[in-house]
Image (tube, grey):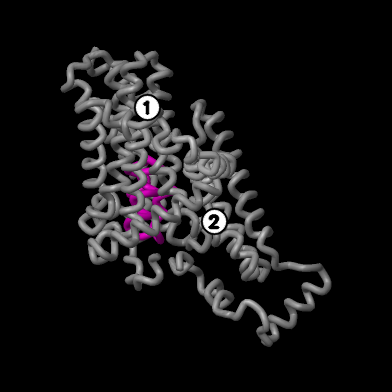
Amino acid sequence: MLLGLGVPRHNNAIRNRPPCGGSGAAELSARAHDLRFGEKDIVIYGVALLAACFLTGMFLGDLLGLVVGVEANVGGVGIAMLLLILVSDALIKKGHLKPVTRQGVVFWSAIYIPVIVAMAARQNVVGALDGGPMALIAGAFSVVACFLLVPAISRIGEPGEPLPELDEEAQG
Amino acid sequence: MTLFDTAANVLVNNGLVTAFAFVGIVIWLSYLVSNKLTAGHIHGSAIAILAGLVLAWIGGLVTGGSRGLADIGVLTGVGVMGGGMLRDFTIVATAFGVNFEEIRKAGVGAVVSLFAGVIVSFAVGAVIAYAFGYTDAVSITTIGAGAATYIVGPVTGAAIGASSEVIALSIAAGLVKSMLVMTGTPFVAKAIGLNNAKSAMVFGGLMGTTSGVAGGLAATDKRLVPYGAMTATFYTGLGCLLGPSVIYFTVRTIVG
């Protein structure tokens, strides 16, 4: 599962609980909560949370672009990702992000690779090859130079810990 | 014939849904190839992305358009599915479950990688432009900008008044970069230590091409995607900021 990566402990604890029919004290109090405030676990809530983070991030990225005077969105996606991380973490800690609601976010993160395949299929490959040797060489050399810099810059600060080995199932 | 037309109409009128089915088939075949022909050594998603690029190339040859497969009538939905909106939306979704601590740890390295990535790509592109006989600061800067990303290229070129031929070249350089990152990353991942969140963030900042980073990391280990994508998304903005200003002035000072 994608969520296996560096998920905070409390997150795991919640995920490992059966989605419904649990009989713990937490489950009972959650049910009491539902009775007081209405249905709390609906898939669109997750999608809407994701959408809200996305739109806010894009808006802030455009604003940042305006502020620094470039005609581009500066880090909109990155800001949206940070928002999603912080907001969902806070909601999980308060017990507000239930399993079905999470599915609304998890689905879109799972559909990510197919979207990337579609993205590859709509690139202007002919245009890239038509650029001739100079475009090819300029692109290729800049990629090689940057590949070589990855280990050097990764050394700044504390070393990163390798992700745990994957079983084939999880990578799918 | 009418039967065929009716079927084609259904596909055209429901483009996005057609794209879901089509991409599903491409991915299924890619995993089949991965398992049967490479014994799983080359990951299915890497093959699928490569297949996407090959299909885009065929699409471009057949239609003469610039949107790859999406220019073919029944497959226009591929353009929607692979367009900026869904790409960014799903990238943001991958951040769900990411540990904020990992991001904070990579902070300084990520910022350094962004500046290094923009400047190194510019420099490499500029040197190669010069080697190919471009001697004016505007063309050199624009082609260097293209070696950053295919968005930084035209934005910079337009800002400093480059010719459309040079802008086209800069876009081509950026496209080449994005495709090489998509397809090459899984092969170099081990050698450059691309197995943790921190190096993925540095990688994203250095490469900068959102599509390249997103595709390359997806084909390597999809758990790395959110980290790389997060820094990559700042790159184009930084490139558009530095290109027509600091870098252009520097190039102009050097070549006179």
Residue sitting at the far left: B131
Across and down, in percent, residue B42 comes to: 26, 59
Q: Nearer the viewer, residue A36 or B106?
A: A36
Q: Quadrant of residue B37?
A: bottom left
Residue shown at 38% from the left, 66% from the top = A171
Magenta highlight range = B202-230
Residue shown at 43% from the left, 54% from the top = A113
* Closer to the eye: label 2 or 1: 1
Residue sitting at the far right: A36
Callout 1 crowding tier (Cα within 10 Å): few <14, some 14–19, many ≥20: some
Across and down, in percent, residue B227 comes to: 42, 54
Examine the rendered structure and indicate whether residue A9 appears above or below residue B184.
below
Residue B103 visible:
yes
Residue type marked 1: Gly
* In the displayed structure image, the side of residue A1 where residue A84 appears, left or right: right
Which residue position is annotated with label 1? Answer: B64
Residue type marked 2: Trp
Callout 2 crowding tier (Cα within 10 Å): few <14, some 14–19, many ≥20: many
Residue shown at 33% from the left, 50% from the top = B216
Q: Nearer the viewer, residue B219 or B131?
A: B219
Residue sitting at the far front: B1
State how far apart marks 2 and 1 are (Cα): 33 Å
Residue B242 visible:
no
